[in-house]
Every structure is written in C-alpha cells, then in structure tokens.
Image: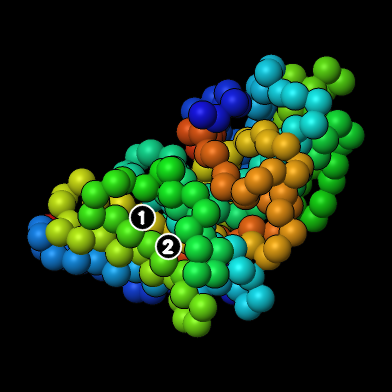
Amino acid sequence: DAKTTQPPSMDCAEGRAANLPCNHSTISGNEYVYWYRQIHSQGPQYIIHGLKNNETNEMASLIITEDRKSSTLILPHATLRDTAVYYCIVRVAIYRDDKIIFGKGTRLHILP
Amino acid sequence: NAGVMQNPRHLVRRRGQEARLRCSPVKGHSHVYWYRQLPEEGLKFMVYLQKENIIDESGMPKERFSAEFPKEGPSILRIQQVVRGDSAAYFCASSPLDRGRLETQYFGPGTRLLVL
C-alpha cells in the first residue's frame, strides 16, 4: 500500500510555480521521498528524490519538512506540458527489489 | 523513458484470444518490471523478472497471466483467454543491477490493450 497522501487534483496558471503537497506521516528514518509524473498516454517519468535535505534539479525542487512528515514538489515555472498526474512515493534506499508502489497521485492541470 | 521499447503500442483482441506484450529493456539492464494501469486508476505492480528468473510475481493474477524474460530477446507478458476486464495499459520498466536506485528505473511508453 502507498504510504502517502496527496490531493486528487490541483490547478495552476501557466508560468506560475506549481506546489504539489504530499503527506507521509509514517515515513521511516531510512526512507526516501520520490516523485514521479505520468503525462497522458505515456509511462511514468522520474522527477526527483530526497532524504531530508531540500533538493533541486533541472526539472523541479523538493522541499522536505524538518520532521519529514510531509514534502512539497515545486515546478518553478509551470508550462502546459507539465499537465500530468504526479506521484509521491516513499521507500527505503536499499530494497530487495525495485518495484514501485504507486498511490493515486495528484492530477495537475496547468491553465493557459 | 530512455530506451525502453514496448510493442505493440496498441493491441485489440476479442474475448478468448491471447495477448502477447513485448518489452525490450534499456541496453545493459537486467531487471524488468511489469505494471498494469486500469482506466482511471493508478499503476499496479504485476511482476518483477531478472534474466531467466521470475523474482516476484505477487501482483500478477494466478490464472491466464504469465511472464518471461529469456536470456536473449525481450521480456514477454502473456495473457491467455483475454476478458474485457484485461483492457488496460501495461507498462514495462527496466533497471540495471544497482538495486535501490529508483531513479535508474526507466519506463516504456506502454501497450494499450483493448478487449472487445
């Protein structure tokens, strides 16, 4: 079972920052937070992950609260191509297998 | 989606026929995962294979479904005697030997199966 809670949908205006929240109140000390997204009719795409420090890459930023019970994915300048379902996943770094347990995710609509 | 190939992209079958879905992993990847996405639902894990071995098939229905990843060639997900409820998008993902690094797992574009 997914151990995260996300809002089912969100809207964001094009060009603005999209902030997608995720609650993971039962996260363990050795579990990372991963974000994936799935654009319509495509396979999931890795975005970013982190343990406890904030992370940034060319796609997004990840802000993890100090108690690690929640995080926010930030798309700094959303475009129409960012319309997708965004999945927040928690899992340990070293695992006996790599299967991903997806939850329901957040359907992000970027509005022109 | 760096290099995982799936074919066919779309497959139409009548009830009772067989469906064979193929997945060619990223070159050098020896781990393959199959996921199913039913309409308006999230992705569900089905099976995890390494070359010539099924490691975890806990998400795969016991009847009619089988998967293989031979020493040579693509991984195959086979569905016998398809029913309408099998209509879904089937995604394959591959990863290299460094377990635990989810960011190295790449997904293919999926095969959309429609059972008439």
Q: Which residue is painted at 31% across and 46% down in the image?
A: B61
Amino acid type, mark 2:
Gly
- Depth check, front residue: A58 or A14: A58
The answer to whether residue B4 is left or right of residue B42 is: right
Residue that sits furthest to the front in the current view = B53
Q: Give above or below for B76 relative to A67.
A: below
Q: Are the residues at dot 2 and dot 1 in contact (C-beta closer than 8 Å)?
A: yes
Residue B55: image location, x then y, percent: 52, 54
Quarter holding the N terminus of chain B is bottom right
Residue A97 lies, with reference to residue B52, above or below; the image says: above
Q: Amino acid at mark 1?
A: Ala
Residue B23 vertical placement versus B81 (above, below): below
Q: Residue at x 24, y 49 (%)?
A: B63
A61 lies above or below B101 = above
Residue B103 image-quadrant placement: bottom right
> Where does the C terminus of chain B fall, quadrant-wise?
bottom left
From the image, tell me which residue sits under label 2. B110
Pick the residue in front: B80 or A38: B80
Task: Say whether residue B8 is visible.
Answer: yes
- Check disc 2: other Cα within 10 Å, few if <14, some if 14-19, many if 20+: many
Residue B41 is left or right of residue B13, and the answer is right
Residue B60, horizontal then vertical, whole percent: 37, 47
B10 left or right, relative to B72: left
Element assignment for label 2: loop
Q: Could you tell me which chain the residue with mark 2 belongs to?
A: B
Q: Secondary structure at mark 1?
A: strand
Crowd rating for badge 1 (residues with CA inside 10 Å; few <14, some 14–19, many 20+): many
For label 1, the residue is B89
The x and y percentages for residue A82 are 60, 50
Q: Chain of mark 1?
A: B
